[in-house]
Image: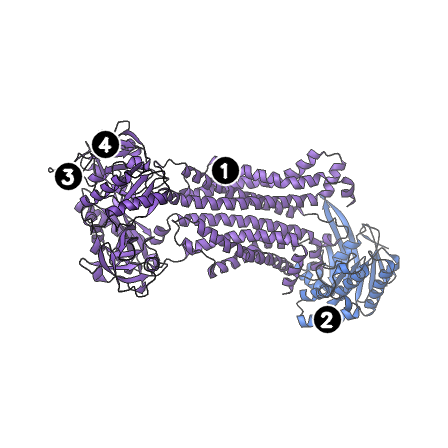
Chain colours: A blue, B purple
Amino acid sequence: MIELRNVERWHEQGGQRAYVLRRITLTIKEGEFVSIMGPSGAGKSTLLHVLGMHDGEFSGEFDFLGEPIHKLSRKARLEVQKKNIGFVFQSYHLLDDLTVYENLEIPLSYRDVKKSERQGIVADVLDRFHIVGKKDLYPNQLSGGQQQLVAVARALVAKPKLILADEPTGNLHSDQGREIMELFRTLNEAGTTIVQVTHSETNATYGNRIVKLRDGWLAD
Amino acid sequence: MQELRHAVRRLARTPLSSLSAILTLALGIGATTALFSALDTVVLRPFPFRDPDRLVMLFETHAKRGSDRFEVSWPNYEDWRRQQRSYDDLAAMPNAVSDGFILEGRDTPRRLKGSLVSGNFFDVLGSRAALGRTFQPEEGRSGGAPVVVLSHAAWQQALGGDPGIVGRSLAINGTATTVVGVMASDFDFPRGAELWLPAVTTLPDVVASRQTGFLHVIGRLKAGVAPETGRAEIDGLVRQLARQYRTDDKGRGAATLAVTDYLLGSTRLALFALFGVVGLVLLIACGNVAHLLLAQGLARRRETAVRLAIGASRGRVVRQQLTESLVLALAGGGLGLLLAAWGVRVLAALAPEEIPRASEIAVNPAVLAFSLGLSLVTALVCGLVPALQASRPDVVDALRDSSRGLTASRASRRLEGGLVALQAALAVVVLAGSGLFARSLLALEHVPLGFDPQTRSFNVGLPDWKYPSLEAKRAFHHALVERVRALPGVEAAAATFLRPLELGGIGVNSWIALEGEGSEAQDRNPSVNYQSVTPGYFEAMGAHILRGRGFEEADGASAPGVVVVGEATARRFWPGQDPIGKRVAVYGAKADPKGGYVWQTVVGVAQDVRHRQVHEAALDLYVPSEQSPFPAEYLVVKSPIETAGLAASVRREIAALDKDQPSDAVALLRFVDRARGGARFRAVLILAFAGLAAALAGFGLYGVLAHAVSRRVPEIGVRVALGARSRDIATLVLVEGLRPVALGLLLGLGGAVAFGRAARSLLFGVSATDATALALSVVTLLFLAVLGGLGPARRALRVDPVTALRE
């Protein structure tokens, strides 16, 4: 699914390049559950954002489902992203002004799914995640765990092939964190590829492969 | 719909800032809409003439006599009409409406304002009667039956709206005159006319000469003929007639003016200038709202990044943001429309008489459409840049959880600075413009009028049918003046042919010849402003005789001719000399049997009186009424008695001489007010707009600085921790705010000069680059900037380094 070859990412600092990622060569197959680990500043989140196609400022080659992402325009890259990738963030990043229902509906609306279809899909997801009773609540009326549940549901609602999660349990207490990780496992078992960035060894055990980064380099 | 719902919900969550944005836009849109209502009704709406674009006013010009708009004599008009080929037809009307039409046969005689027009007047204008008809060709010829067309107002007010009025006979100036039609209520040409009579049947002999220009000629250009072609043809005719009937044609020619320009005068420029100013105010308001949206966009950077991350296209994000500004603008527009509905009433009440159709200014469908369109444009102007700015956050950075809150990019800080500079520039233009107009008004208010505006006046024009000779009229006026002088409390009284400032620039232009000059001098000298007055006039008017004397009873018809000249006239014709004893000849001077002039001796110099325009002194020359072909039309009375009481006494004296002479009383102040009305209207409006602009700019700057301070709290904390003093922090905040203001001031000064130049013809006694107005605008804006910066600076001084650094 994902092929990175010699991917590098740097910032200009005082006329010099400060590398964040160095010669990353990595393959992730469909159906994998990969955990990216490493100390702070190792480049984990940067790698996730490159994979998530928000960040196109890298060198090297990046193929996604056979599509050479490094050759695509920003617009085309974002189209590939929109079709295939869902995101889960540490701070949930739900839209505060929208209800749970609307937070789930909006990615579909961005994909021009018809209103009648959207209603069916969202109802389905609400049901699947057991949050039907919360559909009219706003994010600030939910606990952190519930918010992250909604965030995962939102990441899934457009049926992505890949979910990228950046410290998905970082702001949750352990019970809530476990629930979310269980959910990820279930999703992975159902066929969704998952890549998570985590500091937690426990969370990493939910995946089937760990990729370690140190100072921007892949570590053995 | 989804975007709309979300936009409304989002705005409702920040009610204070949403409300302030809506109010800001409401003020801007409301003021602009109100001004547009005025512009639409007064300027843009077609006048009730067929193809008004083909209608032009025609004047004679005579470069040597210093005027580009001389009235045309009746014989010349008739020659033009016969010989021209460029116009479908030419019509004519006197240069001013006359209040000398006395309607009798009702309860009490009543004066009506009317115009003696050519028989084809309505046909040339292409205006039809609302009731009955206008004149038929034979009614415009000599010997035609006396007929009258009434204005809608006269029909309603003087004749009670009698539905059977057409065909009825009215006694007008002693003649049974058949009403043939009533015009529609929107027909007001010439302005103020209440009735129209065909001129040929009623034209007095005294003005039927080729030497007496009193007509404004209206031409309807043939289809496809350019105005300049028509003007050039009349120009040729003027020269040909001058060669035929005068000494030469040098400097003579013709000028044209579109009828709409004739009717609107300086109103078009004034309203467009005010509309431009109010547009600037709206832009300042837009700047405030745009800044608010920018700040909100910054605060919502992370939200926008999330939207982009979950699949929103940039277009969708822009659309969402624009929907919010659209909701704000529509709410502001709706509220603005309510303000405009109130504003147009204020405008109509403030509008001076010189503005036509002012009473009709109202919110109509065109104004509604304008307001809606303006709201949409406003939404775009306010919202587009913030929306575009917000739609491209650095997604990676914005989503990073370590990202430090509200940090503005350099680009958005530059944008903010640009907005402040733009607002400051616009505010300077409006403030400087208001300074120019206010100083113009002040200068106008301080112009020495040369007469006491508290002098009261009464119209006492006498109808020819009852007083057919000049002598009869003079006898009546002489007797009346004597009686009024004898009234208790009356200090002085006299009679005059014209009252100062009543006709707005119109008066009697006379040629003048000086003893010792050649006979061609009368065509070379500039025209003088001819006034026919009775003895005691200067005393009654409070006008001072500076040298020599005023007129006396001895200056009668058979006495040697005498004149009094104004100061400007004395300076112009006898520079450095004493004019007393000099001899001149002017209009109406009898030729002696040998064909030479009968000279009139200058016996006095009077202080200049602003007879025609407040802003411009004319070359005054006074002739005793007894020696002039112009009979008195008005009584002027100096008295401390209040007008109503004085009017009752004077009317009793008039009735004692002729019980059927109606007379209205007026203080000359009314004409002065009217003459200053345009300047006052402009000054009041622009000062109001300047106040609004200053307030909006002040608030805008406050908003920007407050936002900047909240953005810089951690930095300020560090600075305080490093030992910065209060003075350093305050300077930091104020300098950040004042830098773009300074740039705006520079730009604004350029704009202010350009505005002053564009509106130059509306200014009086002040130059377009008046240093005081410019300096005041700069000082005001700097004061506002410092005032706007004080709150945020105070907040910056209260930053606690410990808390700030922990944040």
Q: Disc 1 on helix, strand or loop?
A: helix
Q: How many marks?
A: 4
Q: Position of residue B611 (x, y in %)?
A: 32, 40
Label 2 marks a residue whose chain is: A
Whether residue B351 is visible, yes or no, is: yes
Q: Disc 3 on helix, strand or loop?
A: loop
Asked if disc 1 and disc 4 are in contact, CB closer than 8 Å, the reply is no
Residue at x-position 27% and y-position 36%:
B536
* Left or right side of B631 for A173: right
> What's the residue type where badge 1 is placed?
Leu
Residue at x-position 43% and y-position 39%:
B440
Q: Residue B746 appears in which quarter of the rendering?
A: top right
N-terminal-most mark, 3 or 4: 3
Label 4 marks a residue whose chain is: B
Q: Position of residue B119 (x, y in %)?
A: 24, 58
Which residue occupies the foreground of this view, B369 or A192? Answer: B369
* The label number, if any, that marks residue B598 in the structure image: none
- Vertical arrangement, residue B613 with respect to residue A158, above or below: above
How far apart are the two marked residues, 1 and 4, measured between alpha carbons?
A: 46 Å
Q: Which residue is mark 2?
A: A121
> What's the residue type where badge 2 is placed?
Ile
Q: Quadrant of the N terminus of chain B?
A: bottom right
Binning the other alpha carbons within 10 Å of mark 1 as few (below 14), some (14 to 19) or many (20 upward) gives many
Q: Which residue is mark 3?
A: B591
Q: Are marks 1 and 2 on the same chain?
A: no
Q: Which residue is mark 4?
A: B602
How far apart are the two marked residues, 1 and 2, measured between alpha carbons?
A: 65 Å
- Which numbered disc, 3 or 2, marks the residue closer to the eye? 3
Binning the other alpha carbons within 10 Å of mark 2 as few (below 14), some (14 to 19) or many (20 upward) gives some
